[in-house]
């Protein structure tokens, strides 16, 4: 199980890249339910 937001972001980014190879016009979003996301968002 991925525990940190950074690990979840990395995994979601890898999955999005794979999906974009198959579906060229796809849009990918990372949905997060946490209060600490504002600090992580600035790092991304």
Image (cartoon, rainbow, N blue to C red):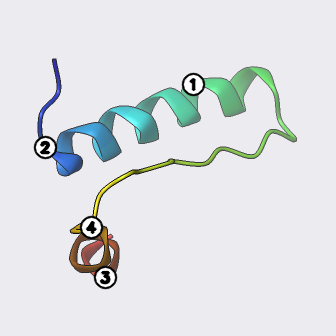
Q: Are marks 2 and 3 in contact (CB under 8 Å)?
A: no
Q: Secondary structure at mark 2?
A: loop
Q: Quadrant of residue 36?
A: bottom left
In the displayed structure image, the side of residue 25 where residue 42 appears, left or right: left
Left or right relative to 1: residue 16: right
> Quick one: label 2 or label 3, which is nearer the N terminus?
2
> Which sits earlier in the primary sequence, circle 1 or circle 2?
2
Mark toward the start of the polypeptide (3 vs 1)? 1
Residue 44 screen position, x and y as percent: 33, 70
Please give the name of the residue rendered at 24% of the width and 70% of the height, measured from the top-left corner. Answer: 40
Q: Which residue is mark 1?
A: 18
First in sequence, mark 2 or 4: give its number: 2
CB of mark 3 within 8 Å of CB of mark 1?
no
Which secondary structure, mark 3? helix
Furthest-right residue in view?
Answer: 25
Front label number (3 vs 1): 3
Distance of label 2 from label 4 (alpha carbons) = 13 Å
Residue visible at 65% across and 44% down?
A: 28
- Secondary structure under tag 4 reads loop
Circles 3 and 4: CB distance less than 8 Å? no
> Residue 10 at what x, y percent from top left?
30, 42
Question: Foreground: 19 or 40?
Answer: 40
Mark 2 nearby-residue class (10 Å; few <14, some 14–19, many ≥20) = few
Question: Which of these two is toward me, 11 or 31?
Answer: 31
Q: Secondary structure at mark 1?
A: helix
Residue marked by disc 2: 4
In this view, 6 is above or below 42: above
Mark 1 against mark 2, which lies toward the viewer? Answer: 2
At a point 33% along the width and 46% down the height, the residue shown is: 9
Mark 3–mark 4 distance (CA, rounded to whole Å): 14 Å
């Amino acid at each position: 199980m991925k525990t940190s937001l950074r690990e979840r972001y990395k995994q979601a980014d890898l999955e999005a890249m794979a999906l974009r190879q198959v579906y060229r016009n796809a849009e990918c979003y990372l949905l997060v339910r946490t209060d600490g996301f504002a600090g992580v968002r600035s790092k991304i």
